[in-house]
Image (cartoon, rainbow, N blue to C red):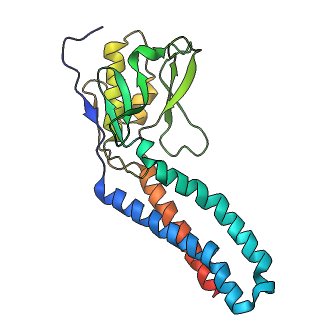
Amino acid sequence: MNTESPFQRVESATHLFATLILNALLLVLFILFTLLFVLGPVYGIYKRGFEAMLYPALLSWGISLLTLIPAISYIIGRKKTASKIVVDETGLLFYDSKNEITDQILYSELRSSRRDFDIYTINPAGSGIVPMVEVTLQKDTKKETTKRIDMNLPYKIIKNKFTLYAQFFRGITIFRPDLKIDPMVLRAYSIDKETWKVSGKGISSGGWLLILATLMIIGVIVGIVFLIN
């Protein structure tokens, strides 16, 4: 291993304004959904009568239960979800709000993919404009598995996610020089291999697309509410 120079620890940085917008939109979406599918049938029964609205109300409440119960369970369990990403000399680490590791990809666990390159890009359906990175891992004595690297966090917009990718890839070249990184990986994330700097990457397109999608869903729900009334 080449450890002549200290390996800098890089931590995820949250884009506060974009994260605030995203969470505000999600809150509005949750309120509108509750008004439409939970309280809406109650209003319908009041306006049109119990018999006329019984089956629509039961259907609406059934949809609400199937949607709200998992959503509320996920919100309650937020403390156990990742809230911070760190790249250090051991690898890629995900921490929860209690500063406990929820997931990790260690350099020591990386294995050869038995392809032309060991770290490569894939373009799964719905993954967005930027392709995802896939690696091969072997944890303890378990079988080798492939894993996709995702520098995103629930309810947060990460503004330095490409820097996290760059530092992780740099760590691979230092601590696992036996592994080959596909040059397409570095091009996809605008990383200069000579300096390991990222050229002009702010909030990812995926982050803005998520906000836009939330706005569109809110618009549709608002439209349905007005049509019903």
Q: Quadrant of the C terminus?
A: bottom right
Q: Tell me if residue 175 comes above or below residue 62 in the rendering.
A: above
Image position of 71 (left or right of 41): left
Looking at the image, which is closer to me, 212 or 48?
Answer: 48
Residue located at (29% from left, 56% from top): 16
Residue 177 picture location, percent across and down: 37, 11
Looking at the image, which is closer to me, 187 or 180?
Answer: 180
Q: Tell me if residue 193 comes above or below residue 157 in the rendering.
A: above
Residue 216 picture location, percent across and down: 53, 67
Image-quadrant location for residue 115: top right
Q: Residue furthest left?
A: 5
Q: Quadrant of the N terminus?
A: top left
- Mark yes or no: residue 64 visible: yes
Residue 106 picture location, percent across and down: 40, 21
Image-quadrant location for residue 81: top left
Image position of 188 (left or right of 167): right
Residue located at (32% from left, 33% from top): 86
Image position of 77 (left or right of 194): right
Residue located at (29% from left, 20% from top): 89
Q: Tell me if residue 48 comes above or below residue 78 in the rendering.
A: below
Image-quadrant location for residue 175: top left
Image position of 125 (left or right of 159): right
Residue located at (34% from left, 61% from top): 20
